[in-house]
Image (cartoon, helix red, strand yellow):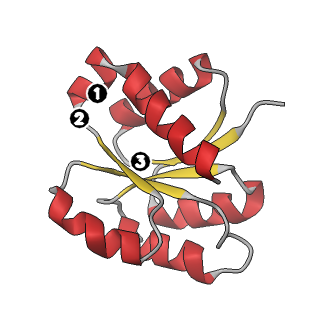
Amino acid sequence: MPTKLLLVEDSKFLRASAERVLVKAGYAVVSAADGEEGLRLAREHQPALVLLDIMLPKVSGPDVLKALKKDPATAGIPVMVLTSLSPKNASQLEKDGAAGFFEKSEVMLSTGPNSLIGAVEKILSKS
């Protein structure tokens, strides 16, 4: 059975592109378009990893991260933050429980889908 990932990303384009890359690499991907849906799907599906955008509608990425880490049902799931924000926010997000970061951009998807896969595999190998 393929490893299940939860992708929480509000950009339709980035969500579809990342999904394609991850599915091609052999992962099962469940997607959410906002933070509220992301929290619900994390509890429902118990993914091996959550890929979490920071700028989300309804519930922000940092709030989703905190909620996942507070909930005993999802606290053990590693969270990789997808961000276009500067790395200076990284230390706060790490304190809140982020397992890793991936700088997203249009470029990451066109030039290097392997860099996304590499980042996912690195976090999964630690957990």
Mark closer to the observer (3, 1): 1
**Viewer-proximal residue, 38 or 22?**
22
Check disc 3: other Cα within 10 Å, few if <14, some if 14-19, many if 20+: many
Residue positioned 52% across, 67% down in the render = 36
The image shows residue 124 at horizontal and vertical percentages of 61, 45
**Does residue 112 appear left or right of residue 48 in this picture?**
left
Return the mark for residue 108.
Answer: 1
Question: CB of mark 2 within 8 Å of CB of mark 1?
Answer: yes
In this rendering, the answer to whether 18 lies above or below 113 is: below
Q: CA distance from mark 2 to mark 3?
A: 12 Å
The image shows residue 68 at horizontal and vertical percentages of 57, 72
The image shows residue 49 at horizontal and vertical percentages of 60, 50
Check disc 1: other Cα within 10 Å, few if <14, some if 14-19, many if 20+: some
Q: Is residue 125 visible?
A: yes
**Does residue 100 appear left or right of residue 20 in this picture?**
left
- Kind of residue at badge 2: Ser
The image shows residue 123 at horizontal and vertical percentages of 54, 47
Residue that sits furthest to the front in the current view: 126
In this rendering, the answer to whether 68 lies above or below 53 is: below
The quadrant in which residue 87 appears is bottom left
Tell me the quadrant of the picture where the N terminus can be found. top right
Which residue in the structure is indicated by mark 3?
9
Describe the element under mark 1 as helix, strand or loop: helix
Tell me the quadrant of the picture where the C terminus can be found. bottom right
Return the mark for residue 105.
Answer: 2
